[in-house]
Amino acid sequence: MKDSPQPAKRRRYDATFRVEALRLAGESRCTQAAARALNISPKLLYKWHKEALTPVAAARGAYLDPVTAAELRQLRALARRQAQELDILKKAIAIFSQTPDQ
């Protein structure tokens, strides 16, 4: 029985590496040169750039730097809190605007 060659495992890149790679590509005049410097495929770099521009990826916080991701979490918590306060005020207005039965 022949030993079949093991397929090459895909490398996984964490979010900080992706953010740094996109920053480097943005600063570089040639995206392909930046990809070569990072030892990754230019197609992969283009894919990351396209994903970073989509609102879905930004909403997930997938490729955000830690500072931006923390700010996004804080803003979402603030929005939830304000929505709850608005619901409470709407209920209070409904209660106090009822005319008492005499």
Image (cartoon, rainbow, N blue to C red):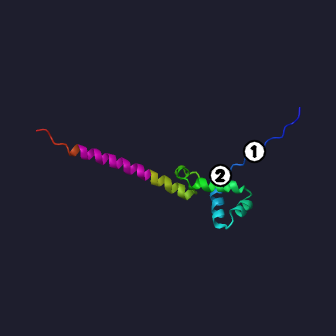
Callout 2, which amino acid? Asp
Q: Residue at x 21, y 45 (%)?
A: 96
Magenta stretch, overall SS: helix
Q: Nearer the viewer, residue 4 or 46?
A: 46
Viewport quadrant of the C terminus: top left
* Residue 32 visible in the shown view: yes
Pick whichever of labels 2 and 1 is earlier in the sequence: 1
- Which residue is label 2 attached to? 14
Callout 1, which amino acid? Lys
Query: Residue 5's x, y, as percent?
Result: 84, 40
Indicate whether residue 22 is drawn in magenta: no
Query: Residue 80's x, y, as percent?
Result: 41, 49
Mark 2 crowd level (few <14, some 14–19, many ≥20, 10 Å Cα): few
Q: Are marks 2 and 1 in contact (CB under 8 Å)?
A: no
Image quarter of residue 4: top right
Residue depth check, mark 2 versus mark 1: number of the one nearer the observer: 1
Disc 2 element: loop
Residue 10 located left or right of residue 100: right
Q: Which residues are magenta?
A: 77-94
Query: Residue 42's x, y, as percent?
Result: 70, 57
Indicate whether residue 89 is drawn in magenta: yes
Residue 10 located left or right of residue 88: right
Q: Residue at x 42, y 53 (%)?
A: 78
Mark 1 crowd level (few <14, some 14–19, many ≥20, 10 Å Cα): few
What whole-number distance in Å separates the C-alpha atoms at marks 2 and 1? Answer: 16 Å
Viewport quadrant of the N terminus: top right
- Which residue is label 1 attached to? 9
